[in-house]
Amino acid sequence: MRYQFKESLATIDHCLDFGINFLDTADVYGDGHNEELMAKVLKRRRQGTVVGTKFGFVGDEHGNVKINGRPDYVQIACEKSLQRLGIDEIDLYYFHRLDPDVPIEETVGAMADLIEQGKIRYLGLSEVSAKTIRSANSVHPITALQSEYSLWQRDVERNILPVCKELNISLIPFSPLGRGFLTGTILNSGSFEDNDYRHQIPRFNSDAIEKNRSMIDKLQQLATKNDVSPSQLSLAWLLAQDDFIVPIPGMKRRKYIEENLAAVELSLPDDVIQDLNHLHVDVSGNRHNTYNLQFIDTES
């Protein structure tokens, strides 16, 4: 555990050394411990960094999880995140998921109050529908939307991308490498540790992985042909979609930083982009289990 802690700190420092200055976290990650980890770096290197964190997930004594978007909780959650991060102002504050019991206008209104108080700079949302984005943006401009987007998860192209472009909202794709699948290194679910979250995702059960192997085989062939890694090709494709897209690949160890960063310099020919576009055909398995799907705001 101590090695992982030291490696995490070294990885953040390594990112900053390479000019990667956008640090993304959430109060629910490690039950606040991830924000506390970032605080150790921010204490030394706050200047020039862009800190994004999220709020909304809450649990009770029985282990049940729900979303809290009540205005009073917005204030409480922000204060706690500021304390854990050890900073006076959060650059980008996201509402992690939509609260079905609280109008988004009320939640965003409370978030806008935090700007007036000097506690946050910009507002973000995560995994919400185009309709919700419009409603939220009518109260206060939304700066960024975080949602899953990659070669094997392209639902945002239908409604989300157009509204982001229209309203000048940056899209921050999480899991741009398909939770590791697009690296070409996942052969079966047996390669995951026992506590790996991917055991709970239908798309990562053994049958689904086997069915999706044809996609990764084609991706590997294209990567080899273009003398890059599957990860670099996947990220370069995402960056080529539009200039308001800022992917956030998970980088738990320093060895991934240089490889992922090299994708920024790749300029993909149109024929390669078209070949990559055709990879997304009948991807097997859902991206979330039934329990977590309930927190996703979709178009009605």
Image (cartoon, rainbow, N blue to C red):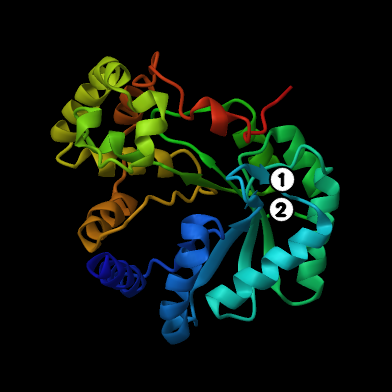
Q: Residue at x 73, y 41 (%)?
A: 133
Residue 178 visible in this rendered orientation of the protein: no
- Quadrant in the picture for residue 203: top left
Question: Is 62 drawn above or below residue 273 in the view shown?
Answer: below
Q: Of the residues shown, which amino acid type is indicated by label 1?
A: Leu
Of the pair 1 and 175, the residue shown nearer to us = 1
Question: Is 74 drawn above or below residue 128 in the view shown?
Answer: below
From the top left corner, tell me how far across and down residue 101 is, in percent. Answer: 81, 39
Q: Residue furthest bottom?
A: 44
Q: Which residue is mark 2?
A: 142
Of the pair 149 and 77, the residue shown nearer to us = 77
Mark-to-mark CA distance, 2 and 1: 8 Å
Q: Is residue 192 left or right of residue 156?
A: left
- Quick one: SS at disc 2? loop
Q: Is residue 133 left or right of residue 296?
A: right
Q: Residue at x 46, y 23 (%)?
A: 286
Q: Residue at x 50, y 38 (%)?
A: 148
Q: Mark 1 packing: few (<14 Cα in 10 Å), some, or many (20+)?
A: some
Of the pair 224 and 201, the residue shown nearer to us = 201
Check if mark 2's residue and mark 1's residue have beta carbons within 8 Å. yes
Q: Which residue is mark 1?
A: 167
Q: Is residue 14 left or right of residue 40?
A: left
